[in-house]
Amino acid sequence: MSDNLRNYTKAIYAMDAVVNRASDSDWDAQSPCEAWSAREVLGHTIFGLKRVRSQAAGADGPAEMAEAEVAGANPQESWAEARDAVLAALDQPGALQTIVQGFGGEQPLDNSLQIMTMDVTVHTWDLATALNQTPVVPSDLAAGAYHGIKAFGDGARRPGIFDAEVATADDADIVTKMAGMAGRAC
């Protein structure tokens, strides 16, 4: 297992812990992402998992649809199906070497998992915050997301990606710093 796959799997299971602690009445709660509810944050994340699953299989990506539709009427069930499908797809021989169109051009799927890990990690914080849960994000993944967003610089600061950085205390933990770097009010 590559380090990128290990981290992606770890991020998926951090999100899984948040999803599994949610109740049916939580999914319409407002998230820190201004235009999204908790359901929409999860739907966005599920779509990302479906996209990675398709890439691992060398297939066309999933059809575009609204985030709330992706999460569906039973977000926990939709999440579990997507989680299991992407992990099974990534476990196939050669899946990580599949060449995909990533943010930096063509690259092995294994390399693009770094960005996807950052996405799942930040949205784990978003979902936990929307659901009034204490965000339990592994510090190594939070550090990776923090430094990844910082490296993108102004290119990451646009609608639908990240808002302007929110200042955090110098002695803040790395999860709080990650949220601030992603433009989330902490």
Image (cartoon, rainbow, N blue to C red):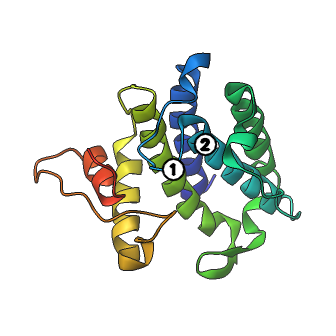
Q: Earlier in the sequence, mark 1 or mark 2?
A: 1
Q: Nearer the viewer, residue 177 or 157?
A: 157
Can you say which quadrant of the picture contains the C terminus? top left
Residue 90 % position (x, y): 75, 51
Q: In the rendered image of this protein, does residue 14 appear above or below residue 41?
A: above
Disc number placed over residue 18 in the picture, else none: none
Evaluate whether residue 94 shows in this view.
Answer: no
Q: Residue at x 45, y 27 (%)?
A: 131
- Residue 7 position, x and y percent, is 52, 50
Residue drawn at (36%, 58%) of the image = 182
Q: Amino acid at mark 2?
A: Glu
Q: Is residue 143 left or right of residue 21?
A: left
Q: Determine the secondary structure under disc 2.
A: helix
Residue 86 lies, with reference to residue 55, above or below; the image says above
- Asked if residue 5 shows in the view, the reply is yes
The picture places residue 117, in percent across and down from the top left corner, at 53, 54
**Residue 12 location, quadrant:** top right
Q: Quick check: marks 1 and 2 in contact, CB under 8 Å?
A: yes
Of 41 and 106, the residue lying toward us: 41
Most extreme residue toward the right is 59
Q: Which residue is mark 1?
A: 35
- Marks 1 and 2, Cα distance to the nearest angstrom? 9 Å
The amino acid marked with disc number 1 is: Ala
Q: Residues within 10 Å of mark 2 (few under 14, many from 20)?
A: many
Q: Nearer the viewer, mark 1 or mark 2?
A: 1
Q: Which residue is mark 2?
A: 40
For numbered disc 1, what is the local secondary structure? loop
The structure residue drawn at horizontal position 54% and vertical position 39%, both measured from the top left corner, is 37
Q: Residue at x 40, y 71 (%)?
A: 157
Q: Quadrant of residue 146?
A: bottom left
Horizontal side of 138 relative to 77 (left or right) equals left
Disc 1 crowd, CA 10 A, few/some/many (<14, 14-19, 20+): few
